[in-house]
Image: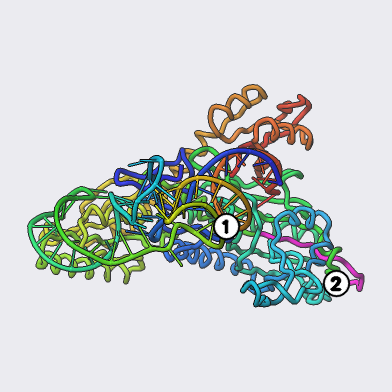
Amino acid sequence: MSNQSETKKGITTREEDYSKWYLDVVEAADLAENSSVRGCMVIKPYGYALWENIQKILDAKFKETDVVNAYFPIFIPKSFFEREAEHVEHFAKECAVVTHHRLELDPATGKLNPAGPLEEPLIVRPTSETIIYDTYSRWVQSYRDLPLLINQWVNIVRWEMRTRVFLRTMEFLWQEGHTAHASRQEAEDRAKQMVLVYKDFLENYLAMPVLAGRKTEAEKFAGADYTLCVEAMMQDGKALQAGTSHMLGQNFAKSFNVSFLDEKGERQFVWQTSWGVSTRMIGGLIMTHGDDKGMIMPPKIAPLQAVLVTIFASEEEKKLTVEAAKELAEKLKAAGVIAKVDDRDERPGVKYFEWEKKGVPLRLEVGPKDVAKKQVIAVRRDNGEKAVIGVDEIVKQVKKLLESIQKNLFDRALKNQLANTKEIDDYSKFKKQLEENDVFISSHWCGSAQCEAQIKEETKATIRCIPFNNKAEKGKCLVCGQESKERVIFAKAY
RNA sequence: CGGGGUAUAGCGCAGUUGGUAGCGCGCGCCGUUCGGGACGGCGAGGUCGUGGGUUCAAGUCCCGCUACCCCGACCA
């Protein structure tokens, strides 16, 4: 089971276990082993560069919508949690709790024991609504203080029983936006606006087609009025929740007393939203585009867009090819392409495999023959196509290829999503389908939590979302046969 | 918390009826190679998870402890 999945011959493929894929192929993540620090990620530089790119692009998008960054404490007093009933009930099951503030050496055993118990235990944030809204209660006094639009990029901890690299780790990195508004409508607009920012980012940068929509009551965030989300399909047909945006209503405002005086001098509670995406997106990215050779990075977020692989058999050839490659790399960099020269004394095949594994979208081969002909051979990571490019037009051609790869990755993923989305109106067919393989199933549902729970119980499929812009269509609920006015998306989820 | 496993070199593993530790990969050096994961030679690297016990002798047998993995319950 735990045999090496990366072998001489090839690499474990997707039907197995994605987490192996990350560990062995990705070179971006690792689990801390042989310690009680379980299920945490070590993000290697290459993986972190990806996260930095994600941060940079998303942050710019947030700022376009007037959101600013701030930072709130990692420790949350236990009592804060207790203020919002639904919230505490959910998160209580997965909290790391700090109960002491120092260690004492026991001379008899040589062991360190916790000492100095805290008056009130602190929770390591599993999400920051409570501590941020406690602060907001002091920051918000007047309608003039609104809207309050703040985001933070932080780590959070959820003590999960079972972890999965990138998709469900005990500690992960994310951004969480927290806004407060004077009116319900404004908050609702903001919640929707942010989920659409996510959709735009996922589709246009990560090349991941997503369904945007609304969660059911059973699937919504604990403490929210309702939750909006973007759901992506992985290559195996399972769903991955890629981002959420919650309309919190006045629930937290009432618990934390976030209120203000309006224009008429009347005290009002604020209307709030919170929204976030995490390093889980990296998992989604890999699972969406990866193939048997490893990852494939969409050019727009790739830590490295083009690698110039030098090919040589002698010192003279090395000098020749490395010089030529460096010159080309400079040209590309000057034009804004993230390029790098691989001049290591390795056989070409070794270099090819390494960069393919890392998903670099474009490989440019520079050998003695190419230098003589003033050309490079460009090989696309997405489809393996080769093209000869004259050095004079390298910038233009490389940019064109990168654009084409970006588009192709999205088109391919969308095609897969559409091909694996089925409309089914009969519950036995629904069950049969999920036994055969995982797909998105568009079906009618009456809206009752009971039918939803029964389907989950019997098939493990959940309602991923009620898509925006769903067409009105009369039908009958899969389970109970009662009237339904629209279809919802069912799938098994990661 | 219930059930089942595992712990030996950086990683993955083998180690027979108890006799003092080996393989593959990786790593270092040398040589031959080099347009898709090369080969040969030499070399470095281990208090065998931990604490006891049996024994002339324990990686191996016995008891305790710890940690991790898998399945289950749990996971907006």
- Note whether residue A324 is visible: yes
Image point (59%, 67%), residue name: A64
Amino acid type, mark 1: Arg
**Magenta-drawn stretch contains A269:** yes
Q: Chain of mark 1?
A: A
**Which sits in the foreground, A245 or A12?**
A12
Secondary element at image label 2: strand
Which marked residue is nearer to the observer: mark 2 or mark 1? 1
> Residue at point 55% right, 60% down?
A35
Q: Nearer the viewer, residue B30 or B44?
A: B44
Q: Is residue A39 visible?
A: no
Apparent side of residue A9 relative to residue B13 in the rendered image (left or right): left
Looking at this view, is A73 or A9 the one in front? A9
| Whole-percent x, y for residue A14 in the image | 45, 41
Between A369 and A185, the residue placed more toward the observer is A369
From the top left corner, tell me how far across and down residue A110 is, in percent. 61, 74
Few, some or many residues within 10 Å of mark 2 (<14, 14–19, 20+): many
Q: Residue at x 9, y 67 (%)?
A: A316
At horizontal 23% and vertical 61% (from top left) the residue drawn is A393
Q: Residues within 10 Å of mark 1 (few under 14, many from 20)?
A: some
Alpha carbon of mark 2 to alpha carbon of mark 1: how far? Answer: 44 Å
Q: Earlier in the sequence, mark 2 or mark 1?
A: 1
Residue to which mark 2 is pinned: A260
Q: Which residues are magenta?
A: A264-275
Tell me if residue A99 is in the magenta stretch. no
Magenta span dominant secondary structure: strand
Query: What is the image's colouring?
Result: rainbow
Secondary structure beneath disc 1?
loop
Q: Which residue is mark 1?
A: A38
